Amino acid sequence: MPDSDTVHVVLTVKFSKDIQNWLEEISPRIKLHVHPARQGNDVPNRVWKNAEVLYTTNVLP
């Protein structure tokens, strides 16, 4: 179960460092996990286990 103080956000799209920094500055609770992927299996299971927010395009239906 995810830590209640941290919001784990999985990005399967590669954003610039500026955008990643901007997202992290929204709240100190945000923890970004950046894994550019073509399919769900490209993201490690340990990341999926704690994921609460997912930003993706065509990786998952």
Image (spheres, rainbow, N blue to C red):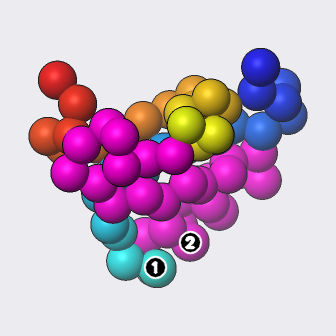
Dot 2: within a 10 Å radius of its alpha carbon, few (fewer than 14), some, or many (20 or more) residues?
few
Between 15 and 39, the residue placed more toward the observer is: 39
Q: Is residue 18 left or right of residue 57?
A: right
Q: Position of residue 14 (x, y in %)?
A: 32, 66
Q: Position of residue 5 (x, y in %)?
A: 85, 34
Report the residue at 37% width, 77% height from top: 16
Q: Split into 4 quadrants, where in the image is the N terminus?
A: top right
In this picture, is 25 found above or below 54?
below
Mark 1: amino acid: Asp
Q: Is residue 14 left or right of residue 47?
A: left
Q: Position of residue 25 (x, y in %)?
A: 65, 62
Q: Which portion, as a residue range, is magenta?
A: 19-44
In the picture as drawn, the residue positioned furthest to the bottom comes out as: 17
In this picture, is 2 found above or below 57?
above
Judging from the image, what secondary structure is the residue with disc 1 in?
helix
Per the rendering, the mark at residue 21 is 2
Per the rendering, the mark at residue 18 is 1
Report the residue at 17% width, 23% height from top: 61
Mark 2: amino acid: Asn
Report the residue at 49% width, 68% height from top: 20
In the picture as drawn, the residue positioned furthest to the top comes out as: 1
In this picture, is 36 found above or below 1?
below
Q: Is residue 3 left or right of residue 60?
A: right
How many marks the image carries: the answer is 2
Q: Position of residue 11 (x, y in %)?
A: 41, 51
Q: Mark 2 and mark 1 in contact (Cβ < 8 Å)?
A: yes
Quote the CA–CA distance across marks 1 and 2. 5 Å
In this picture, is 44 found above or below 54?
below
Judging from the image, what secondary structure is the residue with disc 2 in?
helix
